[in-house]
Image (cartoon, coloured by chain):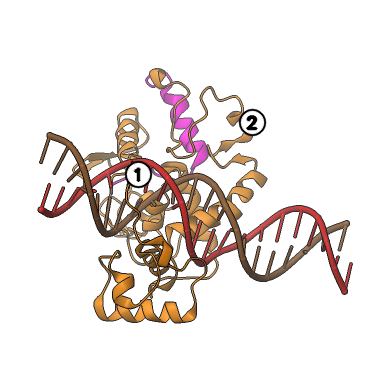
Chain colours: A orange, B red, C brown
Amino acid sequence: MGRSPCCEKAHTNKGAWTKEEDDRLIAYIRSNGEGCWRSLPKAAGLLRCGKSCRLRWINYLRPDLKRGNFTQQEDELIIKLHSLLGNKWSLIAGRLPGRTDNEIKNYWNTHIRRKLMRRGIDPATHRPLKYSSVHQEPPSATTPTIYFPSSSAIPKQEENSKGLILERCPDLNLELTISPPHHHIHSFNTTLCFSCSLGLQNSKDCSCGIHSGRNIANTTTSTSSSGANTTTPGYDFLALKNQCFVLQKLANGMK
DNA sequence: AAGACAGTCAACCGCCTGCCC
DNA sequence: TGGGCAGGCGGTTGACTGTCT
């Protein structure tokens, strides 16, 4: 037995939204706020499914949306985040203020995939195409692609692993303290640490020191909002293990 | 000029998860 | 504890537009 539909399909509009529908939705949310999408259409006088209203609001009508072309910096950030998180579009969107998961997903599929292919990089694995084709176990596009040649051989392959990651993201410090997204992306620099790349310029976990003026090389241990300890080091093996653990948690839908 | 094809993106669909009763 | 519900997510579709032949 299937679940009940989210709305009465027979009496709902589908397809492109009209200006009038947009206006009604905006007016309703302005005066009543978001929430209870199921009952919203009726209350707002819309012949739409609640899900459809939510999507329209989130992806198109929200006032804080940026719209317009993606910048080169956003491009690169999306690529890096995708290499770490896989197709976790909502997580990626959370790091790009004013962008929606749908927008980023579309942009990835239409622009970035092609761009990476032109560079000779497999967009699913973020590795050179020649390596991807001989990889023992092709990683799923929905899983993070920080992986090792053989999962049981991590300690033996330590140098190899570091090499892989550095090869793919030479400017990327994999420290992944989980924090709320920052709301302003300032200028990017190709030598920024991961924190700064995510807009967390003043984070205590910043390891590049560009914004805080402090120096890098110290190894620190911090506790993320999730309670996971993250060690921020040079690329030693324990640090890599910790980072992969955090990545795994992220990829498993930790929100 | 027009038909074919490719690219783009808004919107839909179905599944999953967390919350509440 | 289990079932139902609402919200959220990723994958896919299809309409529209631009470019090529």
Residue A148 against residue A223 in the figure, above or below: above
Question: Where's residue A144, x and y in %?
Answer: 42, 38
Percent across and percent down for residue A29 are 30, 76
SS for callout 2: helix
Q: Quadrant of residue A198?
A: bottom left
Percent position of residue A207, x then y: 33, 48
Read off the residue under disc 1.
A2
Q: Which mark is residue A163?
A: none
Q: Tell me how many marks there are.
A: 2
Examine the rendering and report whether any part of residue A45 can be seen. yes
Q: Which residues are magenta?
A: A154-177
Q: Is residue A111 visible?
A: no
Nearer to me, A55 or A227: A55
Question: How far apart, in angstroms, are the residues tagged by discs 2 and 1?
Answer: 45 Å
Tell me: residue A161, above or below residue A84.
Answer: above
Q: Nearer the viewer, residue A103 or C13?
A: C13
Q: What is the three-letter code of the residue carrying label 1?
A: Gly
Please say whether residue A2 is one of the residues in the magenta stretch: no
Q: Is residue A55 above or below residue A110?
A: below
Viewed as shown, does residue A79 lie left or right of A218?
right
Can you say which quadrant of the picture contains the N terminus of chain A?
top left
Packing grade of label 1 (10 A; few <14, some 14-19, many >=20) is few
| A187 relative to C5, above or below | below
The chain identifier of the residue carrying mark 1 reads: A
Q: Chain ID for label 2?
A: A
Looking at marks 2 and 1 on the same chain, the residue that comes earlier in the sequence is marked by 1
Is A118 on the left or on the right of A102, as rendered?
A: right
Which residue shows up at 53% across the image and 56% down it? A106
Q: Are marks 2 and 1 on the same chain?
A: yes
Instruction: Sort mark 2 into few (<14), some (14-19) or many (20+) by Cα contacts within 10 Å.
Output: few
